[in-house]
Image: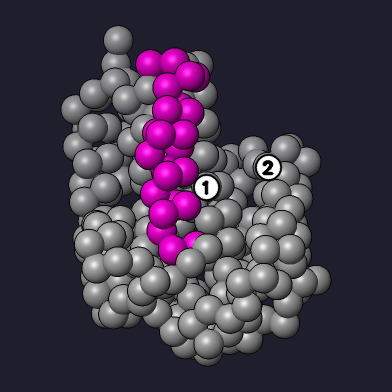
Amino acid sequence: MNNSIALKSILTKEIQRFVRIWVQTLVPPAITISLYFIIFGSLIGSRIGQMGGFDYMSFIVPGLIMMSVITNSYSNVASSFFSAKWQRNVEEMLVAPVPNWVIVTGYVGGGMARGMLVGFIVTLVSLLFVDIQIHNIWVIIATVSLTSATFALGGLINAIFAGSFDDISIIPTFVLTPLTYLGGVFYSISLLPDFWQGVSQINPIVYMVNAFRYGFLGISDVSITTAFAVIGIFIVSLFAIAMTLISKGIGLRT
């Protein structure tokens, strides 16, 4: 019972945190994605034509939605947990009779909530530009849930290691953004030469974007089974790392 109360408290706090400042957390992604649709979809897309048997606008919609989910799931936990660490609130949780998995799950749940809410908002915005079709709703739900959990865990680990607020932006800028843009959001990796197709398969975001695109359009550059296996491996690995770091107090205790 105490664990459920603690989990609910952390999760509620995290959700209220980004909802309270919704103008900063929910509106900007909708505006940014609208610009992507206008520039890449309407202007450039009309020159590209079809990709994967679909018009270019329809092809990039799943990738743009997934991009917003990834970014917001990651940034929500990274900024929130580091703020708690900087204000020494984390120390109170560490000495409280609360299991570490509750702390991890609570923060990750908050990141997932923001990521999926932003994804839903972006989906609604996309309806202004293209008619969305759904091939498999369960694949869509599973992919967006698992992907948001993966990057929420990544954001938590980033916050644990971060020594300043500037460190929070290093991973998104130099790792997350390049991987996202090279993850098949705007193109099919089947268009790449064989060598670069092989390189792309090292990028985990390729599997997430393609699984999500399969849920909408029924097409994918990778095996769906492989995609879910890759995502599952990352979730288990990142969760284990987060639990180890918190249990040992690495980056948390001074």
| Label annotation for residue 71 | 1
SS of the residue under disc 2: helix
Q: Is residue 138 in sight in this rendering?
A: no
Magenta-highlighted residues: 163-185
- The kind of residue tagged 1 is Thr
In the image shown, does 165 or 63 lie closer to the viewer?
63
Spot occupied by residue 245 in the image (x, y as percentages of width and height): 23, 32
Look at the image and tell me in which quarter the C terminus lies.
top left
Spot occupied by residue 42 in the image (x, y as percentages of width and height): 74, 67
Residue 181 colored magenta? Answer: yes
Query: What residue do we see at 24% from left, 57% from top?
Result: 199
Residue 60 colored magenta? Answer: no
Q: CA distance from mark 2 to mark 1?
A: 11 Å
Instruction: Give the image quarter of residue 61.
Output: bottom right
Q: Is residue 177 in sight in this rendering?
A: yes
Of badges 2 and 1, the one in the foreground is 1
- Residue bearing mark 2: 25
- The kind of residue tagged 2 is Thr
In the image shown, does 252 or 155 lie closer to the viewer?
155
